[in-house]
């Protein structure tokens, strides 16, 4: 009996242990299930967004491809900046079997360092750029290697078909196609468009299995008020003046005084926007709006106009210039000549500082300051160009005892070239100050925004403007501006010579700014032109340095615009009818030289004597020499450029090549080298062209090429 009880107790104990183990195991399983569910909840719910993002970053790579930037045209719809399709090279390093070998092979072809390229291959697994926007030659050589893991992506590259022409105005873009300077920067939002985004997906083995491209929107096109032919004329004359006088630089601006439209804006030194990284820092500055300088005697137009407007003087009034000496606040100011009694007209013509100071004293500080501000000095012109300065102009409360005299003759005041030119345009058009503008139209498809001329505001009466125009004409006819006299046209203007401020804050005795600002014809001005040369050597006076450049630009521009000559007593102007070419084109060869390559003499006397036209040059390259054929006393020809102009068409003949199958960029480069004006239709590869391949045409002929996919 005892044994049976013991057996029963043992059975119950075993069952109890089994039950305990089952309960323990069940508890453990329950806890495991709870932990698993909690972990799943944490991963699938709490951390879902973060983990999904990490997975996408590991498996997908988004590449932004720049859109087609809008084209920038001149006023005649000639392209100055355009986008062309080019190849960019990228790699999927995970697919490259021997990354060191590939880096060593590709690097020299693309101008890269093999070590840097290999470093990129080792850091990035699914995608990395090898080199963006490569040349056609580089792309072809890489394609021929047929390397695994190396791919190509079509992008657009900014191309400036005219090279250096208007480079500071247009600006340039970076490798990401974002504007860095000029209009490319200022209007980047409108020109840029919307980029495309390419999605590259890969599996766990880093093998690409999906690629999609988002749709991109092209940028808006911009039409400028610039005329590429007038721009070339201005740049050529400025370059010649800077080289002749070994100057540090200079600026030329041509404006329509009746609308405020800027027809040309040239700065020296210049740069090629296609390769801006090789240019010097000073070459990237647009002096037309960013350079602040003391204008010297060209500023006297404000003082004299204000005195006339306030009826404080008259053109024939005799003013004692005190033998060229006047004392202000214990400071003695000397004239450049010891003048005695001069009429107001002669004060302007001979550029007497003492005479201008006496007029400033009559006006007083407040009235003089009022007219300076009224003419637009001391404020930005908002001409849609970056880096524009407002100039330097202190209020009368900060003037010293000598300030009114210094400002009256163009010292102690800083102006920009555009400010000064706009003031002269107000005198030229009868007293209305117009807002200068350089953008004429912005459009994309049917979407269009035209920038209309401003109504302007009157700064002086028509009577005052008329008196000033006649006095400024006297400067050219018998005053300091004799070298600015034009053939066949009347002109008015003012010379200026100003000392620069040196590092010590004093006026330099060796560095000057020579300038001339004028307009033509006098009665009905079509253009206003400013020429400023910075630190010329061997000569310092605006009459000698800047006036001849004004004459060259004015004669060519007026003939190009077909403005009727109003002074037939002068010799007829000799001109060429070939279209203007860019600076870089002029450097490469002499074929198709600029239109209107007229004689450019530095002395007024030679402008009145018949002579052989001397060879003109640009960037050191000679052009053809022209010889007038009309005998003395014969009537001038009435050619296409207007009455009294002799036009010789000496354009060389060019054979049109076959562009079939070539990309836009290659066609543009060949047309540039041959001097042909390209009009692009469509995109892709060339399919049709007019004139046909093999045609013999004069340099400068327009050619239309249609491209397709």
Image (tube, rainbow, N blue to C red):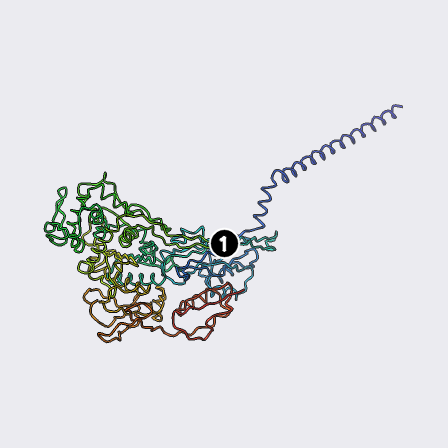
Residue 380, above or below 652:
above
- Which is nearer the eye, 642 or 79? 642
Residue 699 appears left or right of 706: left
How packed is label 1: few (under 14 Cα within 10 Å), some, or many (20 or more)? Answer: some
Q: Residue at x 50, y 52 (%)?
A: 194
The one of 503 and 673 positioned closer to us in this rendering: 673
Which image quarter is the C terminus in? bottom right
Residue 25 pos. (x, y %):
74, 34
Q: Hey, which quadrant is residue 241 in on the image?
A: bottom left
Q: What residue does disc 1 label?
A: 120
Residue reaching furthest top? 2
Asked if residue 5 can be seen in this view, the reply is yes
**Side (left or right) of 599 relative to 143:** left
- Where residue 281 appears, x then y in whole percent? 33, 54
Q: Residue 395 location in percent, x, y?
A: 25, 41
Number of numbered tags placed on the structure image: 1
Q: Residue at x 64, y 40 (%)?
A: 44
In the image, taking residue 702 as reference, residue 428 lies left or right, namely: left
Quick one: quadrant of the N terminus?
top right
Q: Secondary structure at mark 1?
A: helix
């Amino acid at each position: 009996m005892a044994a049976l009880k013991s057996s029963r107790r043992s059975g119950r104990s075993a069952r109890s242990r089994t039950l305990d183990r089952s309960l323990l195991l069940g508890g453990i399983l329950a806890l495991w299930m709870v932990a698993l569910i909690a972990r799943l909840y944490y991963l699938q719910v709490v951390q879902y967004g973060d983990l999904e993002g990490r997975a996408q970053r590991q498996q997908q790579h988004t590449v932004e491809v720049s859109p087609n930037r809008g084209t920038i045209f001149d006023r005649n719809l000639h392209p100055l900046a355009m986008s062309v399709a080019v190849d960019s090279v990228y790699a999927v390093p995970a697919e490259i079997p021997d990354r060191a070998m590939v880096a060593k092979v590709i690097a020299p072809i693309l101008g890269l360092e093999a070590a840097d390229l290999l470093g990129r291959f080792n850091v990035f697994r699914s995608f990395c750029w090898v080199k963006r926007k490569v040349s056609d030659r580089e792309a072809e050589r890489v394609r021929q290697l047929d390397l695994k893991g190396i791919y190509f992506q079509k992008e657009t590259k900014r191309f400036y078909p005219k090279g250096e022409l208007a480079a500071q105005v247009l600006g340039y873009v970076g490798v990401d196609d974002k504007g860095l300077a000029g209009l490319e920067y200022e209007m980047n939002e409108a020109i840029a468009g919307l980029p495309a985004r390419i999605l590259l997906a890969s599996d766990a083995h880093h093998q690409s299995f999906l690629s999609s491209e988002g749709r991109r929107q092209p940028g808006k096109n911009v039409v400028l008020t610039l005329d590429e032919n007038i721009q070339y004329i201005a740049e050529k004359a400025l370059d010649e003046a800077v080289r002749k006088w070994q100057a540090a630089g200079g600026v030329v601006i041509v404006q329509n005084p009746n609308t405020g439209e800027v027809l040309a804006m040239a700065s020296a030194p210049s740069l090629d926007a296609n390769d801006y990284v090789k240019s010097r820092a000073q070459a990237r500055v647009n002096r037309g709006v960013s350079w602040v300088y003391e204008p010297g005697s060209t500023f006297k137009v404000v003082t004299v106009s204000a005195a006339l407007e306030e009826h404080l003087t008259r053109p024939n009034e005799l003013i004692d210039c005190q033998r060229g000496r006047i004392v202000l606040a214990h400071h003695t100011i000397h004239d450049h000549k010891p003048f005695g009694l001069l009429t107001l007209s002669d004060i302007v013509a001979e550029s007497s500082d003492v005479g201008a100071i006496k007029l400033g004293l009559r006006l007083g500080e407040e009235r003089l300051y009022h007219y300076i501000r009224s003419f637009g000095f001391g404020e930005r012109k908002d001409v849609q160009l970056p880096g524009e300065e407002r100039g330097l102009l202190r209020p009368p409360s900060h003037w010293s005892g000598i300030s009114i005299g210094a400002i009256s003759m163009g010292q102690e005041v800083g102006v920009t070239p555009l400010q000064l030119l706009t003031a002269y345009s107000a005198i030229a058009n009868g007293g209305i100050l117009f807002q200068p503008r350089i953008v004429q139209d912005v459009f994309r498809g049917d979407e269009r925004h035209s920038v209309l001329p401003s109504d302007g505001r009157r700064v002086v009466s028509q009577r005052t403007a008329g008196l000033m125009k006649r006095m400024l004409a006297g400067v050219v006819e018998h005053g300091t501006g004799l070298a600015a006299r034009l053939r066949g046209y009347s002109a008015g203007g003012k010379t200026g010579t100003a000392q620069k401020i040196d590092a010590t804050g004093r006026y330099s005795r060796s560095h000057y700014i020579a300038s001339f600002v004028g307009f033509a014809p006098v009665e009905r001005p079509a253009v206003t032109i400013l020429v400023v040369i910075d630190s010329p050597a061997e000569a310092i006076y605006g009459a000698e340095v800047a006036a001849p450049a004004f004459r060259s630009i004015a004669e060519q521009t007026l003939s190009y615009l077909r403005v009727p000559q109003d002074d037939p007593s002068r010799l007829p102007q000799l001109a060429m009818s070939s279209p203007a070419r860019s600076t870089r084109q002029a450097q490469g060869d002499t074929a198709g030289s600029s239109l209107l390559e007229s004689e450019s003499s530095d002395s007024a006397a030679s402008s009145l004597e018949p002579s052989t036209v001397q060879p003109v040059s640009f960037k050191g390259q000679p052009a053809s020499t022209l010889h007038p054929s009309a005998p003395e006393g014969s009537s001038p020809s009435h050619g296409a450029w207007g009455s009294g102009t002799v036009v010789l068409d000496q354009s060389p003949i060019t054979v049109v090549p076959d562009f079939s199958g070539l990309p836009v960029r290659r066609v543009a480069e060949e047309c540039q080298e041959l001097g042909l004006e390209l009009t692009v239709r469509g995109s892709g590869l060339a399919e049709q062209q007019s004139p046909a391949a093999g045609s013999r045409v004069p340099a400068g002929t327009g050619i239309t090429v249609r491209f397709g996919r």
